[in-house]
Amino acid sequence: MRIEDGRAILFTGDSITDCGRSRPIGAGSGLGDGYVDFVNERLAAPSFGRTVAILNTGIAGDTIVDLASRWKADVLDLAPNWLSVLIGINDMLRQFDPLQSSFGVPLDQYEAIYRELLTQTRPTLEGLVLMTPYLIEPSRADPFRVRMDAYGEVVERLAAAFDAVFVDLQAAFDRVLIRQPVGSLTDDRVHPNRAGHSVIAGAFLSAVGFDVGSGATDPAG
C-alpha cells in the first residue's frame, strides 16, 4: 500500500465526509458513520499489520469556498502526511436550487480555488488523494449528472497536475448501478446509505493499493 506505517491521513470535504464526526477534529471513535470510518476499520484490522492514524474534518454543506475559508485550521495546521479531499457536490447542485443558487460555485471558480488550495498544500504532503464528486444516477444524459461529470473532470485534471491518487467515485458507483438500483445505495442520489459509503471506501482503498478483497496490501504498493 502507498501509505506507510505510522502515517496520518486527513479526510476533508462536505457532508459525505462529515457523517456526524466529532468536533473539532474527528478521530478514533469520532470519525462519523460514513466511508471514513469504513476505511479506518479496514486499516485498523490486525491482518493489516500497520498503524495508520485517521482524521476527519469534513463539514456538512460545504462548497470549495467554505473549505478554503477553513483550510489553514482544518488542513494545514494539522500537518497530515496524506490528505484526501472530496468536494464539489454542493458547488454544483446549489446552482440549481432557487433558495441557495447564490451559494453555488461555477465550474471555473471551483477549479481556480481548488487549484490554489492544492498549490499551497501539495509540497507539505507525502501523498494526496482527490476523489470526484458524483451523482448516484446511471443515466449519463441526466442534466444534473452531465454537470456533475464536468466537476469530476476538473478533479481528474487537478489530480494529474498535482501528482495525486485519483479516485473516480462516479465510475465506482456506475459499476455498482449496473447490477443494483439507485435506491439500494441512496435515497436522494447524493447522500449514500451504508452500502453507498462502502462503495466510496472500497474505491479509496483500492486506489491507494489496499486489497479490499482480502484485507492485505498490494505487494507492489
Image: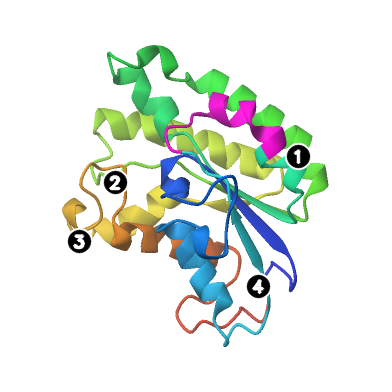
Image coordinates for residue 130, horizontal then vertical, percent: 58, 47
Amino acid type at circle 2 is Ile
Q: Residues within 10 Å of mark 1 (few under 14, many from 20)?
A: some
Label 1 residue SS: helix
What is the distance, in whole Å, between disc 1 and disc 3 at their CAs? Answer: 38 Å
Residue kind at label 1, given as amino acid type: Thr
Residue matched to label 4: 1
Given contact means CB atoms under 8 Å apart, are the residues at marks 1 and 3 in contact? no
Q: Identify the residue position indicated by label 1 in the image.
A: 121
Residue hosting label 2? 136
Sequence-wise, the earlier of marks 1 and 3 is 1
Mark 3 closeness class: few <14, some 14–19, many ≥20 residues within 10 Å: few
Screen quadrant of the N terminus: bottom right
Q: Residue at x 17, y 53 (%)?
A: 183
Q: Quadrant of the C terminus?
A: bottom right
In the depicted structure, whether residue 102 falls above or below residue 37? above
Q: CA distance from mark 4 to mark 1?
A: 22 Å
Q: Which element is circle 4 on?
A: loop
- Span of residues in magenta: 60-73
Element under disc 2: loop
Q: Is residue 40 magenta?
A: no
The residue under label 3 is: 180
**Mark 1 or mark 2, earlier in chain:** 1
Q: Amino acid at mark 4?
A: Met
Quick one: label 2 or label 3, which is nearer the N terminus?
2
